[in-house]
Image (cartoon, rainbow, N blue to C red):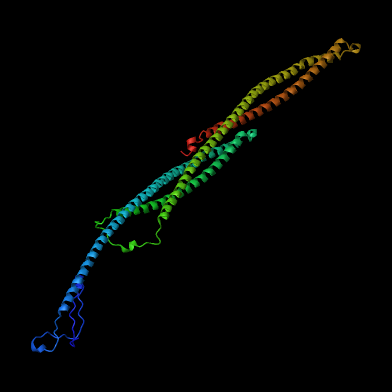
Amino acid sequence: MSSDVLVSRPHYDSRAVAQGLPEKDAPAGPELPQPSSGSATAGYRSAKYTTNEWFSNYRTILEQAGTDHHEARSIQRESRALNQDTEAATSRTQAQGTRLLGERLQEIHYWRSELQRHIEQLLADTEALLALKTRLEKALDATETPFAIATDNLTCRTRRLGPDLVRDSVEEELLKEVDLIRSIQALLKRTTAQVVSQIKMNRDAKQTLELDWSDKYQAYNFDENGGRHSNMSPDTQHHPSSATMQEQVCNHSSWTKFTQDNLSKAMQEEQATSSLRVLVERMLQDTTEDLRVQCSTVDRAFSQRCAELIEAKTQLEINLVEILEQIGAQEKNIVALQQAIHNKEAPLRVAQSRLYLRSLRPNMELCRDEPQFSLEGEVRQIDASVASLQQQLSEARGSLSHLEASRMALEKDINCKTHSLFIEREKCMTHRNRYPTISVLSGY
């Protein structure tokens, strides 16, 4: 080997240039001798490459170029394949996302339609319950009239006189009517409270459905806008954080269950509303029927009582006429008896005068002869007749006194019956004509 020092040639990295990288500076080394000519370089090795080095460098460059060319072709093929694969995968994924968004839109639309249907149903049920509440309030107000009529009838009947102040069937039916009205009023108040409570629950359920519907409406709009995005859409932009899975977000099953639970609650309230409406309608019908039946019962009792009063008054009036006739006849009888007693005075005076004159006869002429016996018998007969007439006159006067007492009793009882009849017919039954009709009692 020569003792001359070999100096390497500068290295030029063509790959760095192809890749657009800055060229690395050559490492610092000893200062290379400048080529020279002539006798100045005599005894030293020339700085030029050898032929072998030239060929070696040439082959190295060719091999490196071939290797780089082959690698570039391979990378280009792989790039085209990868580009096609990623493009197809991206298209498939985007198409699948668009399809899933469409299916999601259909699902949201279905549940939103269900929510809307039940919201409208709850709204209609609430309106029906509000109308029913108004009917209940009107029916409750309507019961005040029959209650006032019944209590007024009881108050009026306390003004009956004497023996007519009796606890009869009319009073018992009126007391039943008052108790029935009070129980119906309590029932209407309880039912009204139930209706108000159901209205509140319906509104709460409707509010829950409306909130869910509103969320689904916004979600539908977001997904619909997202589904309309395409690769050519100008309003798309990068949102790197949106692709991160959020732990607090619900899954599909819980999302579906949430809406199903809301709808289930709404359907429960709809069923409860339907049952309550049927119950209230039946209750209003039953209470109205009960009140009208009791009203008819009281009216019949009043009619029967009035008929009894009329019959009793008629009988009393007939007896009063007979008593008045008897009083007149008895008065005439007393006058006749008095006249008969008075008519006995003259015969008695005649007989007594004859006896007195015959008692003045002298001596043996004063005898008890037939005329004497006849006169004495006549006096006794007249005295007995007068005594009988006096006894009869006393009995007639006693009978007249009894007749007068009966007349007064009859007249008093007739007045009592007339007063009672006035109360029953003019006060009570006339007042009962204001009894509410079936439609009013039903709350219409």
Residue 432 visible in the current orientation: yes
- Tell me the quadrant of the picture where the N terminus can be found: bottom left
Please tell me which residue lies in front, 402 or 164. Answer: 164
Circle count: 0
**Residue found at x 18% / y 73%:** 59
Which quadrant of the structure image shows residue 249?
A: bottom left
Please tell me which residue lies in front, 268 or 437. Answer: 268
Residue 98 pos. (x, y %): 31, 53
Left or right of 269, for residue 161: right
Residue 70 pos. (x, y %): 22, 67
Residue 155 higher or lower than 392, as above or below: below
Please tell me which residue lies in front, 229 or 334. Answer: 229
Residue 158 higher or lower than 241, as above or below: above
Residue 404 higher or lower than 272, as above or below: above
Residue 159 visible in the current orientation: no
Please tell me which residue lies in front, 307 or 36. Answer: 36
Left or right of 362, for residue 346: left
